[in-house]
Image (cartoon, rainbow, N blue to C red):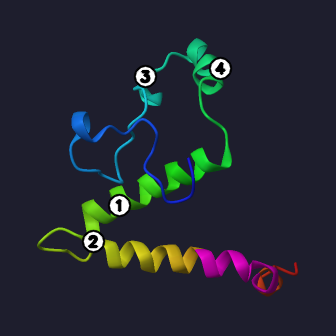
């Protein structure tokens, strides 16, 4: 599988048009339905390669796009989400300078 190719599990005859927000691999138990004793074996079954991580990030991005940015009538939610994400990002990168401006009690 190269960069930009379809996943090897994708079969156009069986799945129809390609959806970048869908996982075409073998379905597994959702994390929210696991018992505590099953978490270790569930984590061991995960594919931990960089391409698998990038595929998961890509699917999450496209799910967000389909839900918030690409409907016929887009609300204000995606713009506020991006605003809050930018605020958190710039707070994190500037925290080294901000932390010296705390208010202290001197008594």
User: Given contact means CB atoms under 8 Å apart, are the residues at marks 2 and 3 in contact?
Assistant: no
Task: Name the N-terminal-most of marks 4 and 1.
Answer: 4
Q: CA distance from mark 3 to mark 4?
A: 13 Å
Give x and y (percent) for residue 48.
66, 38
Mark 1 or 2, nearer chain start: 1
Determine the residue located farthest toward the left in the rendered image. Answer: 72
Residue 95 is one of the magenta-drawn residues: yes
> In the image, residue 24 lies at what x, y percent?
38, 37
Which secondary structure, mark 2? helix
What whole-number distance in Å separates the C-alpha atoms at marks 1 and 2? 7 Å
* Above-or-below relation of 53 to 72: above
Residue with the mark numbered 3:
29
Residue 50 or residue 102, whichever sits in front: 50
Residue highlighted by disc 2: 69
Compared across the picture, whether 66 is left or right of 56 comes to left
- Does the CB distance between marks 2 and 4 fall below 8 Å? no
> What predominant SS class does the magenta segment belong to?
helix
Residue 73 % position (x, y)? 12, 74
| Residue 99 picture quarter | bottom right
- Report the disc number at residue 43: none
Q: Residue at x 87, y 81 (%)?
A: 106
Which of marks 3 and 1 precedes in the sequence? Answer: 3
Q: Residue at x 51, y 15 (%)?
A: 35
Say which residue label 1 marks.
Answer: 64
How far across and how far down the image is residue 19, in percent?
30, 51
Identify the mark nearer the N-term, 2 or 3: 3
Answer whether labels 1 and 3 touch (C-beta < 8 Å): no
Q: Which residue is mark 4?
A: 40
Question: The magenta stretch spans which residues?
Answer: 89-98
- Inter-mark Cα distance, 1 to 3: 22 Å
Task: Count residues near mark 3 (Cα–Cα under 10 Å), then give few for <14, some for 14-19, many for 20+.
Answer: few
- Asked whether disc 1 touches disc 2, contact meaning CB atoms under 8 Å apart, the reply is yes
């Amino acid at each position: 599988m190269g960069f930009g190719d379809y996943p090897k599990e994708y079969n156009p005859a069986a799945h129809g048009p390609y959806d970048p927000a869908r996982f075409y691999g073998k379905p597994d138990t959702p994390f929210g339905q696991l018992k505590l004793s099953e978490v270790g074996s569930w984590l061991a079954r995960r594919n931990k390669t960089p391409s698998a991580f990038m595929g998961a990030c890509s699917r999450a991005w496209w799910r967000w796009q389909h839900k918030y940015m690409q409907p016929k009538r887009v609300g204000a939610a995606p713009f506020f989400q991006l605003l809050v994400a930018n605020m958190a990002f710039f707070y994190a990168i500037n925290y080294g300078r901000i932390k010296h401006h705390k208010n202290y009690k001197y008594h």
